[in-house]
Image (cartoon, rainbow, N blue to C red):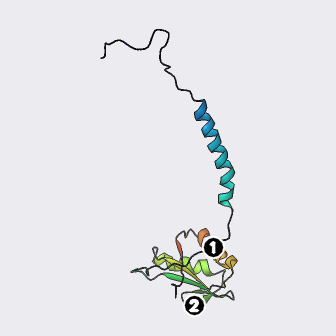
Amino acid sequence: MWAGQSKWGKDMEPMGEINVTPLVDVMLVLLIIFMVTAPLLTQGVNVDLPDASSAAMQQNIEPLVITIRSNGDVFLQKKKVSLDSLTASILAIRKNKADVPIYIRGDAKTPYELIAKIMSQLEQAKINKVGLVTEPIR
């Protein structure tokens, strides 16, 4: 321990507490900034997304493919099915093969509402892993 003479006098002791007022000011400014910018992050912004290519996925299991044409026809593998019987057909197939992946292959002009309905049906049937199939860049 140092036993030398201190340059501080008895009446000039160093302050042993931290002034938190500037810290609180900075934190309040940051809070206001985040409160203003957070709603802007949740709104959709129209952007032109870039094209991207990726390698084909390698799988040992043949997936169930739901194909949706632009006119609203729905196919499970190559068999045409109605929208109402789609979930029952998938659940029947998954009884034997529980791990079979499911992909949705939609035409580029397919209404988004139809794809959303199919995904909603799959979610109600407790099928949470669904892939969307796209074409590579040409």
- Say which quarter of the image contains residue 110: bottom right
- Say which quarter of the image contains residue 125: bottom right
Residue at 56%, 27% in the rendered image = 19
Marks 2 and 1, the one that precedes in the sequence = 2
Q: Above or below — where is 80 with respect to 48? A: below
Q: Which residue is mark 2?
A: 79
Residue 37 screen position, x and y as percent: 66, 53
The circle drawn on residue 121 is 1
Residue 27 screen position, x and y as percent: 60, 39
Q: Amino acid at mark 1?
A: Gln
The circle drawn on residue 13 is none
Residue 115 screen position, x and y as percent: 64, 77
Q: Secondary structure at mark 2?
A: strand
Q: Secondary structure at mark 1?
A: helix
How many marks are shown on the rendered structure? 2
Q: Which of the pair 59/124 is nearer the observer?
A: 59
Q: Above or below — where is 13 with respect to 42? A: above
Residue at 60%, 74% in the rendered image = 49
Residue at 61%, 34% in the rendered image = 24
Residue at 54%, 68% in the rendered image = 128
Q: Are marks 2 and 1 in contact (CB under 8 Å)?
A: no
Within 10 Å of the Cα at label 2, are there few (<14), some (14-19), or many (20+) other Cα atoms? few
Q: Which of the pair 46/58 is nearer the observer?
A: 46
Q: Above or below — where is 90 with respect to 36? A: below
Residue 72 screen position, x and y as percent: 68, 86
